[in-house]
Amino acid sequence: AIQMTQSPSSLSASVGDRVTITCRASQGIRDDLGWYQQKPGKAPKLLIYAASSLQSGVPSRFSGSGSGRDFTLTISSLQPEDFATYYCLQDYIYPWTFGQGTKVEIK
Amino acid sequence: QVQLQESGPGLVKPSETLSLTCTVSGGSVSRGSYYWTWIRQSPEKGLEWIGYIYDSGSTNYNPSLKSRITISVDMSKNQFSLKVSSVTAADTAVYYCARVVGATRIDYWGQGTRVTVSS
C-alpha cells in the first residue's frame, strides 16, 4: 500500500497566520489527493480534491497544490474555526490511504 | 441534502462478528454513480479505508482486512452494511460510513459509531 507521510504532525499558530501542511506519498500518485479537516468528535470534512480543486462551500483561504509525490495544503489566513486536524488521502490506487494527520493548535 | 447514519452494537466480544448498517437519506444507494464506503479510525492506526460497494454489488476491500470483511447493500431499505468477522481488540475503532463521488473523493460522511471489542 502507498504510504502517506504528513508534516508536521502538529503546529501552533495564531489567528491570521499563513499555515502550510505537507504530504508526501511513497510513490507517485499524479494529482489523486484530497485534504480533509476533522474536528473533535466529528467526521472528516472534504476541503480539497484532485490536489488543488476546492470543494463547494469551502472558504477560499484553503488551497492545495502539488503532484506526483509532494503536496501542500495552505490556509492563507487562519481563522478560529480552522483549529482542527488535517489529513491527506490518496485516491490513486486501492487501498486508499490516509496520512497520519496534522493537528493545528492555537498559539 | 444527503445524510448517512451508522447503527449497530457498540460492544462486540472477541472472535465474534461486528455488524454495522448505514442508512442513507436524501439519495439512493441504487444509483450507480457512487461508491458506498466504510472507513474506521483508531488512535493506533489512524484513519483506515475498509472498502466499498458499488453498482449494486461490486465490492473492493482493503487487502489487510479482506478475508474478514463483507460489505453488502439493501436497496429496498436504502442501506448498506459492513460485517467484520473474528474481531479482536485491534478492531476497536470509530466506524464511519461514507459516500465517494467520481471515484475520487469522499463528499458525505456519517457521524461515526464507536465499536469496542471486549469480553
Image (cartoon, coloured by chain):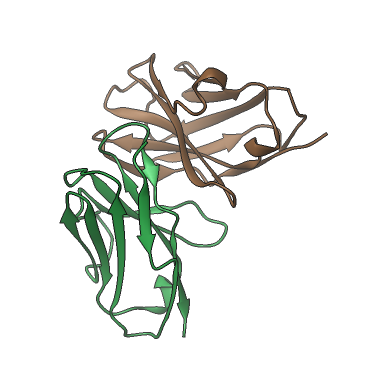
B32 w.r.t. B95: above or below: above
Give the residue displayed 31% in from the left and 84% down from the top.
Answer: A17
The answer to whether residue B92 is visible is yes
Q: Residue at x 26, y 69 (%)?
A: A74
| Quadrant showing the N terminus of chain B | top left
Of residues B60 and B33, the one nearer the viewer is B60
Q: Residue lying farthest right?
A: B119
Q: Position of residue A44 (x, y in %)?
A: 44, 53
Image mark count: 0
- Chain B, hue in figure: brown
Q: Quadrant of residue B85?
A: top right
Q: Is residue A80 left or right of residue B41?
A: left
Q: Is residue A30 left or right of residue B112?
A: left
Q: Nearer the viewer, residue B82 or B86?
A: B86
Quadrant including the C terminus of chain B: top right
The front one of A74 and B26 is A74
Task: Where is residue B41? Give x, y as percent.
Answer: 54, 46
Looking at the image, residue B101 sits to the left or right of residue A106; the answer is left
Q: Is residue A105 above or below residue A33?
A: below
Instruction: Reply above or below: B67 against B89.
Output: above
Residue at the spot x=66%, y=40% of the render? B92
Query: Is residue B1 at all visible to an observer of this figure?
Result: no
User: Is A13 placed above or below B62 here?
Assistant: below
| Letter of the green chain | A
**What's the residue at 57%, 20% (across, down)?**
B68
From the top left corner, tell me how far across and down residue A30 is, in percent: 16, 44
Q: Where is residue B76? Give x, y as percent.
A: 47, 16
